[in-house]
């Protein structure tokens, strides 16, 4: 089992976003390099209310997505 899967999900969120920001151009590249199943990582962070935003290449709060959607509809 990959070490990230046993860590606190908020620490994983921080690690993933730092690595995406500084070292990887996509979630696919990160997951391939550290040898973690992308869907498992996405699910782990979804369970704490975050999803992957491909445009920004980071995980963001599901609440933030709802706020942005509301702003564009107003």
Image (cartoon, helix red, strand yellow):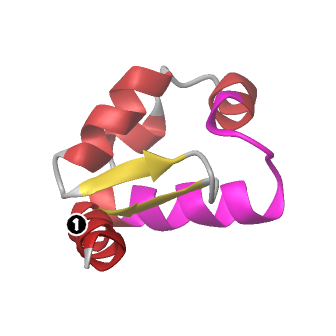
Secondary structure category for the residue under label 1: helix
Range covered by the magenta-colored residues: 11-28
Which residue is at the front of the view, 54 or 4? 54
Regarding residue 55, the answer to whether it shows in the image is: yes
Residue 61 in the image, given as x and y percentages of width and height: 30, 66
Going 24% across and 45% down the picture, which residue do you hit? 46
Instruction: Say left or right for 15 vs 29.
Output: left
Residue 23 counted in the magenta span: yes
**Does residue 74 sit above or below 54 in this rendering?**
below
Write down the residue under mark 1.
Answer: 66
**Does residue 23 sit above or below 71 in this rendering?**
above
Which residue is at the front of the view, 52 or 4? 52
Residue 58 counted in the magenta span: no
Instruction: Say left or right for 53 vs 32.
Output: left
What is the crowding at mark 1: few (fewer than 14 residues within 10 Å), some, or many (at least 20)? few
Residue 57 in the image, given as x and y percentages of width and height: 64, 53
Q: Dominant secondary structure of the magenta stretch?
A: helix
Residue 54 in the image, given as x and y percentages of width and height: 58, 45
Instruction: Say left or right for 52 vs 29.
Output: left
Residue 40 in the image, given as x and y percentages of width and height: 35, 26
Going 69% across and 37% down the picture, which residue do you hit? 30
């Amino acid at each position: 089992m990959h070490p990230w899967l046993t860590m606190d999900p908020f620490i994983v969120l921080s690690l993933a976003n730092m690595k995406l920001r500084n070292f990887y151009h996509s979630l696919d590249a990160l997951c391939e390099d550290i040898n973690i199943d992308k869907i498992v990582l996405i699910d782990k962070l979804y369970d704490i209310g975050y999803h992957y935003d491909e445009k920004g290449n980071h995980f963001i709060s599901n609440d933030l997505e709802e706020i942005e959607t509301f702003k564009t509809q107003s």
